Amino acid sequence: MAMVSMPFSVRSLNSPNLRPTKRYSVMAFAASRKEAVSVGVKITTQGEGHLPKLVLTSDGGSEAEIYLFGGCITSWKVPSGRDLLFVRPDAVFDKTKPISGGIPHCFPQFGPGKMQQHGFARNMDWSLVESENVEGNPIVTLELKDGPYSRAMWDFSFLARYKVILSTKSISTELIVTNTDNKPFSFSSALHTYFRASISGVSVKGLKGCKTLNKDPDPKNPIKGREERDAIIFPGFVDCIYLDAPEELHLHNGLGDVISIENTNWSDAVLWNPHLQMEACYKDFVCVENAKIGTVQLEPKQSWRATQHLSIA
Ligand SMILES: O=P(O)(O)OC[C@H]1O[C@@H](O)[C@H](O)[C@@H](O)[C@@H]1O
């Protein structure tokens, strides 16, 4: 077990001490119903739809769940037992569509665009490649590579590595996309985080002064503007991109939690609440998404890296 004494933060994702201790093939676990992978990490097929799911438990009492389908973190429970993420009641777990909730990946397109909405990474099986535990905090790394399904939409070879670190009061992710092709490619991306909320009490702080692209009413022709408010509230439908957003936002979820949303290299942000378009659940969540809306260009062998750090005080 690797040991470090520093607190977990976005910066700790850079630590040379966080070396992989074990490499795993998901197939090796597919037959077992629930198996420990490393301390604080279990894989089970007893999740929704019997899809393989990782369950991370920290010594500090937090817990997270990650489906390999879509590489989607569906649950982040802080030590009080409160789940700060939200999965929509219409979510399905049969691979016919992406999991609607938690932290889905949008890659290699945020959209709208030529490809299906939000790309294909949330519709594919990711592999568990590394698992370790550092001072009671479980860490897993998932990988996604191109295959026939992705090639049919985007004819490039790529490698995406997604590291997730759970600690007592935070969950951190690092996404590294590498061009493994012999020709350049470009992409856009986002972490489409669904936070549990009581929408009438929600506010998002930190975006004042940002340039905006308001996708309401027409997502294909967003209206340019500038955010003037200190605190953004959600009295109706909201679907808005914030360009060059700061590295830290604060979400008051209306349920008593204040969540710090830090990032490096996710240069933009998106706020979304569907209001009456999803009458059954819009009051119960808000999406605050770290995004890269302007495309990233990668030459062969080049990589792009971005981190997200969600935490409570
Ligand atoms: O694909 P999902 O999870 O239903 O999310 C859709 C929404 O995702 C948001 O990120 C977009 O800004 C919206 O325009 C879109 O409607």
Image (cartoon, rainbow, N blue to C red):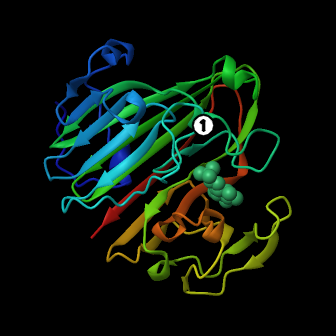
**Residue 202: horizontal and vertical position, in percent?**
47, 78
Residue denoted by label 1: 97
**Residue 308: horizontal and vertical position, in percent?**
45, 54
Tell me if I can see residue 36 in this picture.
yes
Q: Is residue 61 above or below residue 149?
A: below
Residue farthest toward the bottom in the current orientation of the protein: 229
Question: What residue do we see at 26% from left, 40% from top?
Answer: 56
Tell me if I can see residue 303 in this picture.
no
Lateral position of residue 18 relative to residue 202, left or right: left
Q: Is residue 213 above or below residue 34?
A: below
Question: What residue do we see at 72% from left, 22% from top?
Answer: 151
- Count residues near mark 1 (Cα–Cα under 10 Å), then give few for <14, some for 14-19, many for 20+: few
Q: Is residue 303 above or below residue 106?
A: above
Which of the image's four quarters has the N terminus? top left
**Of 305 and 218, which appears nearest the observer?**
218
**Of 173 and 118, which appears nearest the observer?**
118
**Residue 282: horizontal and vertical position, in percent?**
54, 67
Q: Is residue 241 above or below residue 75?
A: below
Residue kind at label 1, given as amino acid type: Lys
**Residue 274: horizontal and vertical position, in percent?**
63, 66
Ligand 1 lies in quarter: bottom right
